[in-house]
Image: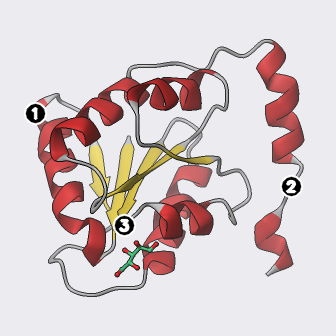
């Protein structure tokens, strides 16, 4: 399942991504914001990341104005590897090398077509494992959320 979330700065882009993925037949869960009203991005990141960390097969997509706040918030969660991406090569590498389970995007910094291509590149890639697992294992030893 793909778990979506945005604040008001990413709402329009999140809705475009949602339509795009629904057309492609993905099973989605939308954590909001559902109407574009002003919300705090850490609240939405928290809900998306809790769901993603509970189901290892799930991936999250978070959108705020720049993607920066969402990526910072997401990476505070144990087991979450969020990648703030603005090009398709990085989107592919985020899955293949970093096993990123959350994609963060800027709703105010990316055009819609590029954002949808980034989403497709991210979801269309797979973790390569091998030597990358040693590095991901190291990342998994960081338990930021417990420090809060
Ligand atoms: C909201 O105005 C904006 O600060 C937020 O969407 C995001 O860009 C934060 O990183």
Q: Nearer the viewer, mark 3 or mark 1?
A: 3
The residue at which mark 3 appears reads as 64
Left or right, residue 6 beside residue 130 = left
Q: Tell me which residue sits at (66%, 24%) in the image.
A: 97
Q: Quadrant of ligand 1?
A: bottom left
Distance between mark 2 and mark 1 Cα atoms:
37 Å
* Element marked by disc 3: strand
Residue under label 2: 142
Of discs 2 and 3, which sits in the foreground? 3
Residue ID at (28%, 65%): 10
Tell me how the rendering is colored: secondary structure
Where does the image place residue 84, in percent across and percent down from the top left? 51, 49
Instruction: Indicate the secondary structure of the residue bearing disc 2.
Output: loop
Determine if the C-beta at disc 3 is less than 8 A from ligand 1. Answer: yes
Q: Position of residue 4 (x, y in %)?
A: 34, 55
x, y percent for residue 71: 55, 60
Instruction: Tell me the quadrant of the picture where the C terminus can be found.
Output: bottom right
* Quarter residue 11 falls in: bottom left
- Mark 1: few, some, or many residues within 10 Å (few <14, many ≥20)? few
Q: Quadrant of residue 38?
A: bottom left
The residue pinned by badge 1 equals 23
Please report whichever mark, 2 or 3, sits nearer to the chain's N-terminal start: 3
Q: Residues within 10 Å of mark 3 (few under 14, many from 20)?
A: many
Q: Position of 78 compared to 74: left or right?
A: right
- For label 1, the SS is helix
Q: Which mark is residue 1?
A: none
- Badge 2: few (under 14), some or many (20 or more) residues near its Cα, within 10 Å? some
Q: Are marks 2 and 3 in contact (CB under 8 Å)?
A: no
User: How many angstroms separate mark 3 from mark 1 (CA)?
Assistant: 23 Å
From the top left corner, tell me how far across and down residue 18 is, in percent: 19, 48
Q: Residue at x 65, y 51 (%)?
A: 80
């Amino acid at each position: 399942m793909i778990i979506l979330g945005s604040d008001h700065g990413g709402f329009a882009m999140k809705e475009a991504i949602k339509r795009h993925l629904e057309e492609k037949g993905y099973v989605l869960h939308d954590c909001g914001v559902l109407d574009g009203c002003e919300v705090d991005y850490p609240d939405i990141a928290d809900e998306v990341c809790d769901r993603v960390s509970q189901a290892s097969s799930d991936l999250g997509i978070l959108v705020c104005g720049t993607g920066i706040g969402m990526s910072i918030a997401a990476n505070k969660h144990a087991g979450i590897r969020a990648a703030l991406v603005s090009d398709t090569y990085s989107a592919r590498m985020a899955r293949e090398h970093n096993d990123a389970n959350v994609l963060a995007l800027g709703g105010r910094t990316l055009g819609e077509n590029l954002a949808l291509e980034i989403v497709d590149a991210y979801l269309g890639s797979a973790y390569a494992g091998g030597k990358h697992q040693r590095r991901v294992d190291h990342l998994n030893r960081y338990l930021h959320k417990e420090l809060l």
